[in-house]
Image (tube, helix red, strand yellow):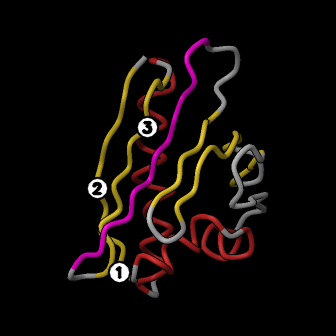
Amino acid sequence: MKDYKAYFIIPEEPALVYQALTQQDTIELWTGEKAIMQAEPNTEFSLWDDDIVGKNLAFEPGKTFQQEWYFGEQEEPSIVTIILHPHGKGTSLELRHTNIPEDAYDDLVEGWNEVYMASLIDFYSGES
């Protein structure tokens, strides 16, 4: 198992970035894909039309949330924690993803950087 940690600058205030990451309608706007999401602990979620599935664990509105991402039958849960910090250019998004299966690590890191975060940054930058 591997862990991944990264920081991203999102050109929008933390409250709106939090909304974009936790509200189903807004997620569908910036991903362009079907999503299932409720910002409530112990609810299942699905992003990018079931490409990412898991369970919501905890929420602190406007600041942080935590999810378990499913990777089949692994013993240790794969936990994603996103923490939003105010930044001069909008929001500094701190990403921590633990217990990533070795065989999924490279694709997952690429997905975080090139798809997930790039799409969110583009959404707030007005790019497409």
Quadrant of the snapshot with the N terminus:
top left
Q: Which residue is mark 3?
A: 97
Mark 2: amino acid: Tyr
- Residue, x 49% and y 71% (percent of image)? 62
43 lies left or right of 9: right
Question: Alpha-carbon neighbours of circle 1 within 10 Å: few (<14), some, or many (≥20)?
Answer: many
Asked if the magenta segment contains residue 78, the reply would be: yes
- Residue, x 63% and y 64% (percent of image)? 22
Instruction: Choose between 94 and 127: the one closer to the eye.
Output: 94
Mark 2 or mark 3: whose residue is earlier in sequence: 2
Q: Which residue is mark 1?
A: 11
87 lies left or right of 102: left
Chief SS of the magenta region: strand
- Residue, x 42% and y 72% (percent of image)? 121
Instruction: Choose between 76 and 107: the one closer to the eye.
Output: 76
Give the extent of the magenta segment: 75-87
Asked if the magenta segment contains residue 106, the reply would be: no
Identify the secondary structure beneath mark 3.
Answer: strand
